[in-house]
Amino acid sequence: MKKFYVPVLLSLVVVFLASCGGGTPEAVSIDLEMNEYGFVPEKLDFKVGQEVTLNLVNKGQLQHEVMFGRDVMKKDNRPAGYMEDMFEVGGVTPEFSQVGEPEAEHDEEMHEGFMMVLPIGGTGVIKFTVTKEMLGEWEMGCFEQEGVHYDAGMIGTVTITN
Ligand SMILES: [Cu+2]
């Protein structure tokens, strides 16, 4: 008789775990605004396994970009990107599309990792699924005009938890 209870109990445990975080977190879609000099919102929180859609819009009067990473690298003593790219560490290739081509000259070689550059009024969409390798604290930043935007505080935080 006893052995009949074991599968029932196990299935109850499975249902219980699934209902309290064992499952996939709900997908999120966030509007992310760029301006002089910041991101709105400036703090993003995601969960491992979450499908994230970022809808970017440049509402400023200058060209802006966004990169996700940590440990700022310098070029000619100016902030020029991140040593660690969040997507590279996460083993993720984000899907992206944008409306509007960057106008101002842009030094691609200065940066490593994923970057989206938006002209004034430009919009873009970045989609990715958060992996466990991405757990922890990251930054998003704009390094336009040889790091002037970054120094001016065009920095946000991205926190990834389980
Ligand atoms: Cu900027």
Image (cartoon, rainbow, N blue to C red):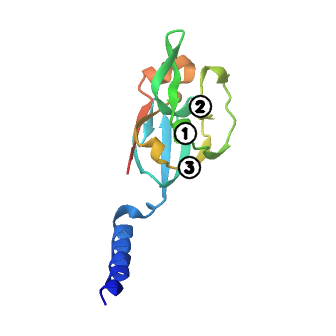
| Badge 3 amino acid | Phe
- Residue 29, numbered circle: none
For label 2, the SS is loop
Give the labeled residue for mark 3.
128
**85 and 13: which one is in front?**
13
| Badge 2 amino acid | Gly
- Residue 113, numbered circle: 2
Q: Are marks 1 and 2 in contact (CB under 8 Å)?
A: yes
For the residues marked 1 and 2, what is the alpha-carbon distance in whole angstroms? 8 Å
User: In the image, is residue 156 above or below residue 71?
Assistant: below
For label 1, the SS is helix
For the residues marked 1 and 3, what is the alpha-carbon distance in whole angstroms? 9 Å
Residue at 51% x, 24% y is 83
| Badge 1 amino acid | Phe
- Residue 87, numbered circle: 1
Residue 126, can we see it?
A: yes
